[in-house]
Structure formats: structure tokens, C-alpha cells
Amino acid sequence: MAETKDVFGQEPHPVEDDLYKEPTRKRRKSDRDQRFRAFPSMEQSALKEYEKLESRTRRVLSNTYQKLIQSVFLDDSIPNGVKYLINRLLALIEKPTVDPIYIGLFGSTGAGKSSLINAIIQQAMFLPVSGESICTSCIVQVSSGCCVQYEAKIHLLSDQAEELSIKLDPYIRTQRRDWDGEAAEMRIWPLIKHVEVTLPKSDLIPEGVVLVDIPGTGDFNSKRDEMWKKTIDKCSVIWVISDIERVSGGRAHEDLLNESIKACQRGFCRDVALVVTKMDKLHLPEYLRERKVGNQAIQSQREAVLERNEMIKLQRTRILKEKLKRKLPADFKVLEASDLVYTVSAQEYWQQALLTEEETEIPKLREYIRKSLLDKKKRTVTKYVTEAFGLLLLTDSFNSTQNLPNEHLHMSVLRRFAEEKVELLEKAIAQCFACMEQPLQEGVRTARTSYRCILRACLVRSKGNQGFHQTLKAVCLKNGIYASRTLARIDLNEALTQPIYDQIDPVFGSIFRTGKPTGSALMPHIDAFKHSLQEKMTEIGIRSGWKYDSCKKNFLIQEISAILGGLEDHILRRKRRIYESLTASVQSDLKLCYEEAAQITGKKACERMKDAIRRGVDRQVAEGMFERAQERMQHQFQQLKAGIVEKVKGSITTMLALASSQGDGLYKELADVGSEYKEMEKLHRSLREVAENARLRKGMQEFLLRASPSKAGPPGTSL
């Protein structure tokens, strides 16, 4: 598999060998300011403050790391505690600034995905726009300012968008054909499956956002289907793209919405929206004849388009919200979104014959992108500075010569308390996962009674078997899954397990949601465990005289947050495997059945293949296929529980051992990091000031807009 990385107007950035040196390098002011060009002035100020906090924190960590390295450089053996410090410092220094926000655009061929990206990045014909013989053939990622780095075999450079678009043509477009139907040019698909296009720093799209254009569902083959399934799970935002002519009667966007909701269940996706494109397409006489809303007379094409936009928003928002409520927990973030449906027109964005730029809603999508990145930057920097502060607390306290009275007694009390709380956490996790038992059982019962009807719907064609033989053979050769250019995607394993998913989806989503602690929510129980330990540490500190050794208390409190914060990534990685265990189990059980059916040839082969599949499924169901799928999912939950408990126990034990090891001869005298600690303490205090400044600016802007909208100016105007 080949990959191509395309850099628009700039050379690729080299990868640094010593990443921990990054904080010591000063970014040129002009370069730093350019990174925020896509944001209005108020948001620029907040971003600059957060970046300054992060940059200074990295510098403090780097200085501390270098001092520790120098102090143990010539030692034959390095104490375990010092190793812990050095490794933790290095991990924080090398930690990425902000992981990119992946926004996936999913829709049928011709729905307008590429046109939408072109409008957002202000390059009219940069990505291929679908026509009779042209469409995007591979995954295309578009980002600004080199926020993503891939090891490419092929680099294409150009100073002009039009020139680079021509160079990209063979890599990202399907095969063209002449008017007589003969192939005119050979395309490089499927040798090239992934193209990354990096734009210069932009006034429109901020660095840190990646727009992902996925080949249309109407242009599927098995390899693109595999790409699509992998890519959707890494997207934190999914925009389902459907043009106005298909949004009411077509099924493609409904299927994609269902897949997007599944991505919320199993992957990183936290936000889903429906983007209806080509809203400028409207036949006025036909619209007026069929118009059933509003008393006001429509006088122009523009009025009709705007009225229909509002109607589509209301209707589709209600339908989408109902669908999300059935599948997701009530407090899931996307259900609180102010905009679930966008009505856009890329063509009108360029021409503005009917609509203004704002009315095309392209600027609205850019605003969403900016807000998402700003919110993520705030959360990431706050967590980063807090974790760094806790580490500096510990490092500075190692050089303390004070010994607290009854130190071992106090720490032993804390150890016993932690052990008891870990046991309670294990029980709470078991109770969370036990909530899955009843819906799993109900789903299995439903699946057993409905699987024949499901198979019939998948295997019987209203037009007979003509042309279906090869499709069915492909389904069997691909272990029950086939994506074609002309038919809807077929997945027998998913179809057979859908009754189980219908039962478990709301509960599964509740387990992995955030919010108030409940019997079925996992993360709030972990948070409650964290807070109970922190409260106990504070209590012991006050009672036992830790008032003059606040570093130790603060370190313990901060390190608990860092340890348990890392669990979330572990849980998210396991979440997808758990969710997909049902279909994986059924696919494994039916493998021999598919292989047997695929070998059938000759007269009436299609019906005989269907019979072989039916017999195979009947046999596996009788032998407990659905019950085995249930057991495998429950086993995955048990493995997750064991992994969480093991990680918590190990980390807490190590942390308490470090905190109680002063005076035990485990540490040699380290370099003085008192100045670094004091600077880190100031940075930690600054977090609150930055947040308060951002709130103040937002309040001032809202006041000005309310007081005098005409004088407030556009979003980019300084206050």
C-alpha cells in the first residue's frame, strides 16, 4: 500500500529526534500569530494565552528534566524513584500539543462532499467534484499548517492550488472514460489509498483540524468499504452529507446516520450532524404548487429557498433527535447541540446570486470548526498544566529534609483506605456491566425468533435472482459482507445481530457516558473513586500535620487525577472491541457456512447458495450462535473490568510508595528545582486567570451585541 502526502505551498516539517527539546525552541512571533489567523480577535486572545501557558509549562518541564539527567548522569545505578520522575517528565514533554480533530464527511457519490470542502477551504475546484465519470477514489485528508504527519512515499509540492490539483488528479480520482466508453487514463487506485493535503496557514481553517473526504457509498468496493469502516471510528465529528433531492426519499443518508450513531457507541465520535447540500436547487412553480406551509406569499426564488431551508431544518432536526434519543443516553453531548442540521449551498457560496455568504451556511460550519478546536485546546492545556504542576510538586519535595512525625502510620492508613476503595470500585464496575445482562438476553431471544425474516429480507430480491448470483457469491467470499457500486451495502452478520444491538444500544451508551454517577455509568464511578481518595488525603494532611508539607498532599491529589485520567484512553480503545464482539462472533461461527456456499456453481446456483446459507444459519442458531455472541461480549466486559482494576492498583501502589519513601535511603540528593517549582506554581494559578479573562471578553462582546448590534462589527473586529 502506498501513501501520498501533499504539501500545498510549503516543505514538509522534519521530525525531531529529541522531542523533549521542543519547549526550549522559541517560535517566531510572526509564525505564532499566523497560527491564529482563522480566529476572530477575541478567540485569538484566548488561544494565545493558552498556548503561552503550555509553552512555558513545556519549558519548565524541559529544564527540570535536564537538571535531573545531569544529577544522575554518572551514577552506576539510578534509584527507582528518580527513574519514575525522569520517565514521567519525558512523557509529558513528548505529549502532543493537541491531537487533531478529525471531521469525517460521509455521503453518496455526488452528494457534494468535495464541493463542500472546496468551499470551506476557499478553493473552488481543488478536490474533484463528482460528474458522470469522475469522483473521489480514496480517502483524502485536508488540513492546515502541517497538523498531521504521515510517512509518505510520494511528496507533491506546488505554490498554486490549481497546479497542485492537477498533480493530485491521478491519485484521488477514479478512472476517466472517453465518450465512447473506453478508458482514457489509468488511475492509480487501489495502489494509493490515502492522500493527505496540507494547506498553508489559513484565514479560514485553523491548524489542528482535519477534514476527511471518504469515497462515496455509491462507489463502494470491498477495499473502500474496509477503509470507510476504519476511518469513521477515528473521527470525533461526523457530518452526514445528503443533497436536497435525496434527503427526503433516499436511504443512503439514513444508513450513514445509523453508522454514525454506531460510531458514537463504539468509537471517538461525540458529535453528529446532517448537512443538506445543493439548497439552491429549487423549481419555483413546482415548489409553490406543493407548498403546504406558511400564510405569507412567496414572491421570489430566494424567499422560497430560505423558507424551504427552515422547513428542512425543523423536520430533519426533529427526526434526527428522535433517532439519537432512541440509541444514545439522554445526557449525550450531541443531544444538547444547538444545530443538528445545516442547509448549505457551495455553488451559491461562490456565485451569491440568490443567497448571501452567511445564508449559504459555509461560514457557520467554519465557526463550528473553530469553536470545537478552541474548546479542545482549553481542556487539553488545563489538564496538561495541572498534571505538570503535580509532578513538579513531587520533584521539589524530594529534596526536603523534613520528616513528619508518624509518617509511616499516616501512609499505612492511606494505603488501607485505597485498598478498600479499589475493592468498592471493582464492585461498582461489576454492577455497571451487569446492566447489560437483561438487554443482551432480550436481544438474543428476539434474534432467535426473527433471524429467518432477516435472512429472507437480505437474500430475496423483488426482481428475482438475475444478476444477484455474483453478488451473493461475493458476500460469501467476504465472510458475509459485500459493498458494491450498484447495490446497498450487504452485511449478513450485522443484520443477524441487529435485534441484539437494538436492545443493548441505550444501555451500552449509558455505560460509557459522562455525567452524574448512576448504576450504569462507568466513568463517574472512577471519578467518584478519585474524589474519595483526594478527600482522604486532604483529611489526613490536615489531621496529621501535612500543613507544613503541603507539597506531598498536593502531589498525591494531582497524581491521582493523572493516573485515573489515563484510564479513559484505555477504556475508549477497548470500547470498540466490546461493541463489535457480537458481529465478530457471528461471523466466526458462520465462516464455514459462507465457505460452503461460495463453492456452489452450476444450475440454479443462486438458490442453492441461499439454501446453504439458510441451513448453515439454522444449524448455528440451534447450536447456540446468539448465546455464544452474548457470552463473548460479557467476557470482553470482564476483561475490561480486570484491566481497569489492575491498572488502578498498580498505579496507586507505586504512587504511595514514592510519596512515603523520603528518608528511606532510596533517593540521593537531586538538583535543586525550587525555581522551576515556583514558576510552575504561578502557571497553575494562571489557569484560572485565563479562564476568567475569556469569560470576561465573551460577556463584553455579548453586551455590545445586545446594546448596539449595528456597531458591534463583524466577528473578527477587535473589542
Image (tube, rainbow, N blue to C red):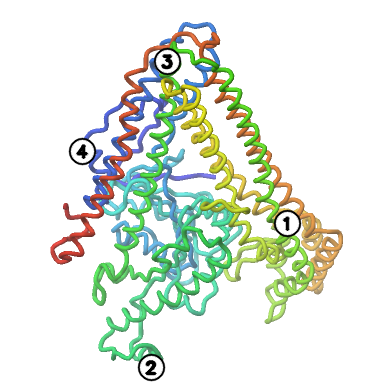
Cβ atoms at labels 4 and 3 below 8 Å apart:
no
Query: Residue tagged by mark 4?
Result: 30
Q: Based on the displayed image, in which of its 4 quarters is residue 656 positioned?
A: top right
Residues tagged 1 and 2 counted as in contact (Cβ below 8 A): no
Q: Which residue is mark 3?
A: 68
Label 1: how many residues lie within 10 Å, few (<14), some (14-19) or many (20+)? some
The tag earlier along the polypeptide, 3 or 1, is 3
Q: Nearer the viewer, residue 226 or 95?
A: 95
Residue type at numbered disc 2: Arg
Q: Quadrant of residue 286?
A: bottom left
Look at label 4 and name its amino acid. Ser
Nearer the observer, 516 or 271: 516
Whether residue 474 is visible to the viewer of this picture, yes or no, is: no
- Which numbered circle lies on residue 289? 2
Q: Earlier in the sequence, mark 4 or mark 1?
A: 4
In this figure, which residue is indicated by the disc labeled 1? 437
- Mark before the other along the chain sequence, 4 or 3: 4
CA distance for labels 2 and 3: 79 Å
Give the spatial CA distance, label 4 vs label 3: 34 Å
**Horizontal side, residue 435 vs residue 289: left or right:** right
Marked residue nearer the N-terminal end (1 or 2): 2
Compared with 119, 430 (above or below) is above
Classify mark 1: helix, strand or loop.
helix
